[in-house]
């Protein structure tokens, strides 16, 4: 890939109000996204919710991708109608719609393929319609996920969204279970006494996770469609998430240990800055001249960061706790966005593939 192709690469961040408070939080998000030159991926269950979110678009021409309700099922006519409603109402305003995959992609593969053909036919009738990306989300066997897309190579408006954390954590769990009698590696985060003896095996499983992401990316990219990626780091020992998941981490995070391992008391997550650079470089090599988009789907961690230049947005607030929490989360997204852009730019140079680590580690440990 060369510099002339970079216009086909879109970078976005998770854009939503995850904390309690008024619309000043979204104004803050608009400000930080605009400063970073970052597009927005926003969740919406209804067209009204999306219209509200678009009121805070980071810029007139900022790219927007919409993450649809996870309960939608492509097999259901009502779900297809809702997807088409979004596509028709916001054609020309958004570039993509993200839909979760479903176990029926395996159990009813023929029906699911037929449903994909039906919706592609309808999307084709909409001028400037957004792409429909089906996300790897429910833990399917990666081979089954790629088999579905191999069955629809001629569909111009339906493609894949690879969530690197979901793919990686599933593969890490499978790898560890194979060598440990079916045990789930993620339960070890609550069994600190066992970790010193098992940490090397955990790290082997983590390496298997990152390898599985690259393997699936290679297969999906070979189908010659636009590709969308949800980017976030992961580690089976992470206790970051209030939802109990092991991913949606910053690429600049570390996983603390209560013992020394290879001279340190922390391990890097599944990818880290260098792993992100490798993933980006490989993606751009594989997709060649086709469009590719990356969304940083990193969750907030609860830390606070003073508002400084954005304090005027919250003049009416007497308690700035959530405003500062939002500001911290946005700072994490923008630091990761800088890292992502550095990786994209490095991938366009002749020395592509060299590690990218110019961004300092986060001033906190997850």
Image: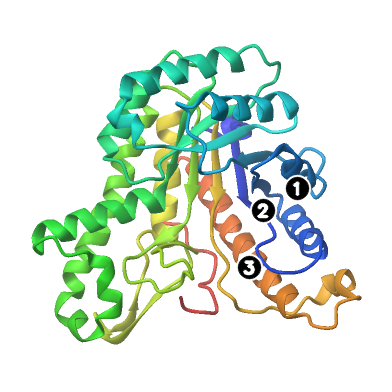
Q: Position of residue 79 (x, y in %)?
A: 55, 30
Which comes before the other along the chain, label 2 or label 3? 2
Judged from the image, the secondary structure of the residue bearing numbered disc 1 is helix
Q: Position of residue 147 (x, y in %)?
A: 29, 26
Q: Is residue 28 above or below residue 139?
A: below
Disc 2 vs disc 3: Cβ atoms closer than 8 Å? no
Instruction: Residue at 63% x, 39% y: name it.
Output: 65
Q: Which residue is mark 1?
A: 53
* Residue 59 visible, this orientation: yes
Which comes before the other along the chain, label 1 or label 2? 2
User: Residue 359 versus residue 29: which sits nearer the camera?
Assistant: 29
- What distance separates the C-alpha of mark 3 from that of mark 1? 18 Å
Q: Which mark is residue 329?
A: 3
Disc 1 vs disc 2: Cβ atoms closer than 8 Å? yes
Q: Is residue 304 above or below residue 252?
A: below
- Dot 3: few (<14), some (14–19), or many (≥20) neighbours within 10 Å? many
- Dot 1: few (<14), some (14–19), or many (≥20) neighbours within 10 Å? some
Judged from the image, the secondary structure of the residue bearing numbered disc 2 is loop
Judged from the image, the secondary structure of the residue bearing numbered disc 3 is helix
- Dot 2: few (<14), some (14–19), or many (≥20) neighbours within 10 Å? many
Q: Which residue is mark 2?
A: 15
């Amino acid at each position: 890939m060369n510099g002339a192709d970079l216009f086909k690469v879109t970078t976005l961040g998770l854009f939503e109000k995850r904390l309690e408070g008024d619309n000043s939080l979204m104004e803050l998000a608009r400000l930080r996204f605009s400063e970073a030159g970052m597009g927005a991926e926003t969740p919406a269950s209804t067209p009204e919710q999306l219209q509200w979110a678009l009121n805070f678009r980071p810029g007139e021409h900022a790219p927007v991708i919409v993450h649809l309700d996870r309960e939608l099922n492509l097999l259901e006519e009502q779900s297809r109608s809702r997807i088409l409603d979004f596509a028709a109402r916001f054609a020309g305003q958004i570039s993509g719609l993200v839909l979760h995959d479903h176990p029926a992609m395996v159990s009813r593969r023929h029906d699911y393929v037929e449903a994909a053909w039906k919706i592609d036919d309808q999307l084709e009738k909409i001028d400037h319609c957004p792409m429909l990306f089906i996300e790897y989300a429910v833990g399917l066997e990666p081979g089954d996920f790629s088999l579905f897309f191999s069955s629809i190579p001629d569909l111009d408006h339906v493609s894949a969204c690879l969530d690197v954390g979901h793919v990686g954590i599933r593969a890490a769990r499978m790898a560890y279970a194979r060598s440990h009698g079916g045990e789930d590696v993620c339960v070890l985060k609550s069994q600190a006494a066992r970790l010193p003896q098992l940490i090397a095996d955990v790290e082997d499983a983590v390496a298997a996770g990152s390898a599985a992401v690259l393997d699936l990316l290679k297969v999906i990219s070979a189908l010659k469609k636009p590709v969308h990626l949800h980017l976030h780091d992961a580690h089976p020992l992470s206790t970051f998430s209030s939802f109990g998941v092991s991913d949606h981490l910053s690429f600049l995070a570390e996983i603390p240990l209560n013992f020394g391992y290879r001279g340190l008391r922390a391990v890097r997550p599944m990818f880290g800055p260098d792993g992100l650079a490798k993933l980006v470089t490989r993606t751009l090599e594989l997709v060649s001249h086709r469009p590719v988009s990356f969304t940083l789907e990193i969750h907030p961690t609860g830390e606070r960061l003073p508002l400084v230049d954005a304090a005027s947005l919250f003049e009416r607030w007497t308690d700035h706790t959530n405003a500062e929490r939002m500001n911290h989360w946005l700072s994490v997204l923008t630091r990761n966005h800088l890292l992502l852009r550095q990786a994209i730019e490095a991938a366009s140079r002749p020395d592509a593939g060299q590690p990218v680590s110019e961004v300092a580690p986060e001033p906190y440990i997850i």
